[in-house]
Amino acid sequence: MKFTFEITEVTGEYGHRFPLLSANEFPFIRCQVVPTLPDQYDTVMKALHQRGEYIVTAKGRTDFCIIQAGGTKDGHQLHITQDNYKSIDRAICDCMQAAADFWAIKTSKQP
């Protein structure tokens, strides 16, 4: 499936600002871009793993990663059942990878 994203900038609970990518297609999740500096990448990844985050990266990029933010775009509801949880989980994983790939292209430094 092809995903498109709306980009907004959000202020976190500690005052830091970060990009938020909201999927325009099912599962309508919101993905937080977590910027990382080269010398802090491993530290940030370790901290996110310890928090239990599902982390997605783009191939060859260590300047950011993607985690799932709370909620969905425009309050869309995901009805998760015992029959559909695997397909919804797959859709969320695919959407997060698409968000990472989208952000990598958007922020690539091309001549």
Image: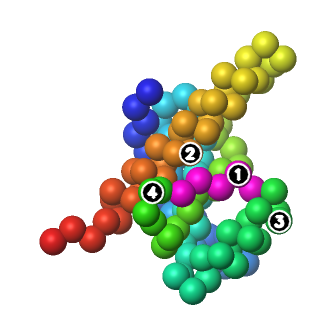
Establish if 110 lies above or below 71.
below
Kind of residue sitting beneath label 3 = Gln
Dominant secondary structure, magenta: loop
Q: Is residue 54 magenta?
A: yes
In the rendered structure, the answer to whether residue 92 lies left or right of residue 13 reads left
Residue 84, horizontal then vertical, whole percent: 73, 17
Question: Marks 1 and 2, Cα distance to the nearest angstrom?
Answer: 9 Å
Q: Residue at x 48, y 48 (%)?
A: 99
Which residues make up the magenta segment? 53-57
Residue reaching furthest to the left: 111
Looking at the rendered structure, the kind of residue marked 4 is: Lys
Residue 24 location (% of width, % of height): 47, 36
Residue picked out by circle 4: 59
Q: Disc 3 designates what residue?
A: 50
Q: Residues within 10 Å of mark 3 (few under 14, many from 20)?
A: few
Q: Specify whether residue 58 is in view.
A: yes
Say if the magenta span includes residue 7: no
Q: Quadrant of residue 78?
A: top right
